[in-house]
DNA sequence: CCTATTTTAATGCAATTGCATCTATATAGG
DNA sequence: CCTATATAGATGCAATTGCATTAAAATAGG
C-alpha cells in the first residue's frame, strides 16, 4: 500500500498538468500557424536524424518518444507517406524494419526547429532563469525514474 | 523577436514533456484498471463540487480546466449522460446554462479520489521530498503566467 | 528439433479530439 | 431603438487515439 500524498505532491501534480497544457498549447499553436506539422513529427524526425544512416527500429523510436506502439506505427505511416522517412526491411529481424530520415525529413526538421526553438524560448526561457530551468529539469527527471 | 532558447530551457522543456507523459500514463492506468473514468472526469467533478449548489457555467469550467470549448461541451454531455452532472437553464443569460454536480457525481468523485490520490503519491510523492515537490510546483506555476 | 512463449508491428473499429461553422443571445455604439 | 460585434455553446465532419486483436517471426525450454 502506497498511502496518501501530501499537499506538496498534489500541488506539484496540479501544476504539472496545467503547465504542460499551457506550454504545449502555445508551442503547437505556433507550429500550426507557421503551417508546420505537430510536435510529434518533430520529435520523431529529430530522433531519426540523430540516429543517422542506420536509423532506428520502430520499437526503439517508440521507447525514445514514450509513444504507444499503435501510435508510433501510425505516425510512421504518416511520415513515410509524406516522404520524410523511409521504411527499409531489416536483415537482422524479418518481423520488423528500420526507419531512416530522408533529406526532405531533415529539411523539414530544420525548418520546424526555427519555429519550435522560438516557441520554447517563449514558453520556458522567457519565464525562468537558467538556474531555475536547470532545477526544474532536474526535478522533472526524477518523476521519470523507476 | 524572441530569440533562441538556452540549453537549460530546452532541457526543461524536454523533461516537462517526458515527465508529464510518464506520470499521466501511470495515473490514467490506475484509474482504468480500477474501472473508473478518466482524469478529466475527476477534474470536472471536483471543480463542480467545490462550486457547490450554484454550480458553474460551462465557460467557467472550461477556463478552470484549461479545456477547449468543444471538448468541454462534449465532456459535459458525457457527464450529464452518466447522471453525474445536471444542466440547468441560466436565468441571467439565456444563451447558456449552469452545471451542477449530482449526488451520484459526488459519490463517484469520492471513489475516484481514493485511487487518484494513491496514484499521485506513486507518481510524485514517492519520488520527491516535500521541499522538492514545493519547488517543482512553484517553478511550474511560473510557466503558466502571462 | 519441436512446441510454447515472447516480441515486433499492423489494423479494424469505437471513442475522442480538432477544426470550422452555426445558432442564439448579449452587449456596444450610434 | 437598431445594427454591428462579441460571447456562449453545440455540432458535422475529418483526423487522431485507444483498445483489442491479429499475423509473423524470434527465442526459450524441453
Image (tube, coloured by chain):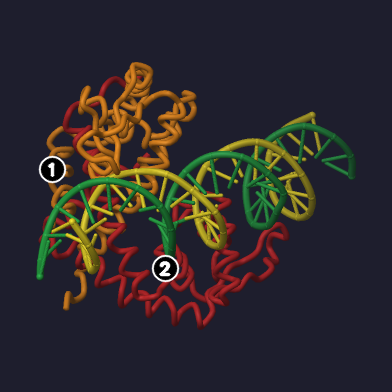
Chain colours: A red, B orange, C green, D yellow
Residue carrying label 1: B135
Q: Badge 2 local density, few (<14 within 10 Å), some, or many (20+)?
A: many
Instruction: Name the residue nearer the viewer: A116 or B68.
Output: B68
- Dot 2 lies on which element? helix
Query: Image point 12% across, 36% down: which residue?
Result: B131
Q: Considering the image in quadrants, where does the N terminus of chain A appear? A: top left
Query: Given the image, what chain letter belongs to the residue carrying mark 2?
Result: A
Is label 1 on the same chain as label 2? no
Query: Image point 16% across, 78% down: which residue?
Result: B1
Please tell me whether residue A11 is drawn above or below residue D1 in the rendered image: above
Instruction: Name the residue nearer the viewer: B85 or A49.
Output: B85
Instruction: Name the residue nearer the viewer: B83 or D27.
Output: B83
Query: Given the image, what chain letter belongs to the residue carrying mark 1?
Result: B
The answer to whether residue D11 is left or right of residue B47 is: right
Give the total number of marks visible in the rendering. Answer: 2
Please tell me whether residue A44 is drawn above or below residue D19 in the rendered image: below
- Dot 1 lies on which element? helix
Query: Image point 19% across, 26% down: which residue?
Result: A6
Instruction: Name the residue nearer the viewer: A106 or B105.
Output: B105
Q: Where in the figure is residue B65, as x and y percent of width and height?
A: 27, 42
Residue carrying label 2: A42
Q: Where in the figure is residue B119, as x and y percent of width and height?
A: 35, 29
Amino acid at each position: 500500500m502506497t498511502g496518501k500524498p501530501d499537499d506538496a505532491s498534489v500541488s506539484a501534480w496540479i501544476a504539472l498538468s496545467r503547465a504542460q497544457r499551457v506550454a504545449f498549447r502555445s508551442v503547437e499553436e505556433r507550429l500550426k500557424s507557421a503551417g508546420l506539422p505537430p510536435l510529434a513529427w518533430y520529435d520523431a524526425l529529430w530522433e531519426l536524424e540523430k540516429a543517422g544512416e542506420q536509423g532506428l527500429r520502430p520499437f526503439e523510436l517508440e521507447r525514445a518518444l514514450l509513444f504507444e506502439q499503435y501510435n508510433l506505427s501510425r505516425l510512421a505511416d504518416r511520415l513515410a507517406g509524406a516522404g520524410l522517412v523511409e521504411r527499409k526491411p531489416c536483415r537482422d529481424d524479418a518481423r520488423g524494419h528500420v526507419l531512416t530520415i530522408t533529406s526532405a525529413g531533415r529539411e523539414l526538421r530544420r525548418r520546424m526547429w526555427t519555429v519550435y526553438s522560438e516557441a520554447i524560448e517563449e514558453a520556458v526561457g522567457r519565464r525562468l532563469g537558467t538556474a531555475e530551468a536547470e532545477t526544474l529539469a532536474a526535478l522533472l527527471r526524477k518523476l521519470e525514474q523507476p
